[in-house]
């Protein structure tokens, strides 16, 4: 059986051969081509000074980001969307299962049971050194990244790396295989009338996930079985681009949710600059970037959920596996009605009539 050093060297050689054949690829694409996890590609670089394995003390790490008081650029992504925000970690609360960061700029929901490994990574980017702390799950997928763009943030990150540097600097990272998703329950076995009434009776958008579990439905199955007019499948091309451009034109502040399995990152505020580049729709604002690969959008839905503050309207994008790519809402807070400007915007763009007429 190969030792860790031999496994790491073998992976390095395969990576180099792939790069020679096809040029530079995104780390995620390289991992997929080689049948490994992204964290394994990061780990094989340990020992050269550019990558340092950190202790997986995740609660303390996030608390250290907050204690530094420094501004970072934070990034979360899935296969088809990337969100990047600049800001300071504030109001950090990390529990055994759920973690929260509740500043308006860095606004995160963390699912701690998915966090498995963490590394300091230093690389050249556009002629400058760019340093980061990167978190991964047991399958080696990226969960969340924290970048130091300013000199003071870099000094703070150096101190955090020194504090959390692991005694284990092995260049090999073990990886678990992903567990296959359970197949959807057949519609005929679902209490559809009970499910639809429970949807109408919702009082909080956060209760929607409990509703799915209670009735044993997947997210996209729930949208198919929703009460009439509460979930409408949209069949329009360039829908997100139009939505974002109209939000700019009308000055409507929005909320954008993009998540990995371990982190949902949220932007709240107005959008200023929307740019289309091939299959990518991009928001290129000073402190907020969004990159959305529209080729991965299998379905788009206008979704309405009742709350004690009235109906909340969203546009939700899903890939071919029924996974959420991104969700768009109007800016809102508990206790405040949904912005009428947002509701009108999304209904206009989607070509849907109001829920109540």
Image: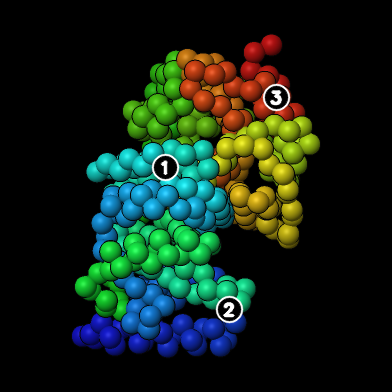
Disc number lying in front (3 or 2): 3
> Which residue position is annotated with label 1?
90
Q: Specify whether residue 1 is in view.
A: yes
Disc number lying in front (2 or 1): 1
Q: Secondary structure at mark 1?
A: loop
What quarter of the picture does the C terminus occupy?
top right
Q: Position of residue 270 (x, y in %)?
A: 66, 38
- In this view, the residue farthest toward the right is 249
Q: Tell me the residue at 25%/82% (across/down).
A: 4
Q: Secondary structure at mark 2?
A: loop
Q: Is residue 259 left or right of residue 181?
A: right
Note whether 276 is above or below 166 in the view shown: above
Q: Is residue 208 left or right of residue 20?
A: left
Q: Tell me the residue at 68%/57% (across/down).
A: 280
The alpha-carbon separation of the residues under discs 2 and 1 comes to 37 Å
> Which residue position is annotated with label 2?
24
Q: Position of residue 298 (x, y in %)?
A: 60, 48
Ranked by sequence position, the earlier of labels 2 and 1 is 2
| Nearer-the-camera pick, 73 or 173 | 73
Q: Tell me the residue at 62%/73% (across/down).
A: 126
Q: Position of residue 171 (x, y in %)?
A: 31, 79
Q: Secondary structure at mark 3?
A: helix
The alpha-carbon separation of the residues under discs 3 and 2 comes to 44 Å
- In this view, the residue farthest toward the top is 357
Note whether 177 is above or below 215 in the view shown: below
Give neighbour class at mark 3: few <14, some 14-19, many 20+ (Cα, 10 Å): some
Q: Position of residue 21 (x, y in %)?
A: 57, 86
Give neighbour class at mark 1: few <14, some 14-19, many 20+ (Cα, 10 Å): many
Note whether 146 is above or below 93 in the view shown: below
Q: Is residue 12 left or right of residue 127?
A: left
| Nearer-the-camera pick, 272 or 328 | 272
> Which residue position is annotated with label 3?
341
């Amino acid at each position: 059986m190969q030792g860790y050093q031999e496994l790491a060297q073998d992976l390095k050689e395969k990576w180099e051969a792939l790069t020679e054949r096809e040029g530079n690829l995104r780390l995620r694409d390289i991992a997929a081509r080689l049948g490994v996890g992204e964290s394994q590609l990061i780990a094989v670089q340990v020992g050269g000074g550019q990558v340092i394995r950190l202790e997986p003390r995740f609660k303390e790490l996030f608390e250290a980001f907050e204690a530094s008081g420094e501004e970072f650029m934070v990034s979360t992504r899935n296969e088809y969307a990337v969100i990047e925000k600049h800001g300071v970690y504030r109001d950090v609360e990390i529990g055994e299962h759920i973690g929260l960061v509740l500043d308006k700029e860095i606004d995160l929901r963390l699912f701690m049971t998915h966090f498995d490994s963490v590394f300091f990574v230093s690389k050249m980017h556009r002629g400058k050194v760019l340093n980061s702390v990167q978190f991964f799950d047991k399958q080696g997928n990226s969960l969340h990244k924290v970048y130091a763009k300013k000199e003071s943030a870099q000094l703070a990150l150096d101190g955090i790396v020194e504090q959390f540097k692991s005694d284990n600097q092995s260049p090999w990272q073990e990886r678990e295989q992903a567990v296959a998703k359970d197949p959807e329950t057949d519609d005929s076995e679902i209490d559809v009338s009970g499910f639809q009434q429970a949807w109408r009776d919702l009082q909080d958008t956060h209760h929607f996930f409990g509703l799915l579990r209670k009735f044993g439905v997947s997210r996209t199955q729930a949208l198919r079985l929703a009460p009439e007019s509460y979930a409408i499948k949209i069949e329009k091309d360039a829908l997100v681009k139009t939505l974002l451009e109209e939000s700019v034109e009308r000055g409507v502040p929005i909320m954008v949710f993009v998540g990995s399995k371990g982190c949902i990152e949220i932007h709240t505020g107005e959008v200023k600059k929307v740019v289309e580049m091939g299959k990518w729709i991009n928001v290129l604002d000073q402190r907020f970037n969004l990159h959305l690969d529209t080729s991965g959008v299998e379905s788009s839905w206008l979704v309405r959920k009742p709350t004690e503050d009235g109906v909340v309207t969203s546009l939700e994008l899903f890939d071919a596996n029924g996974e959420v790519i991104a969700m768009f809402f109007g800016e809102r807070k508990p206790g405040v009605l949904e912005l009428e400007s947002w509701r009108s915007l999304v209904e206009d763009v989607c070509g849907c009539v109001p829920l109540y007429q």
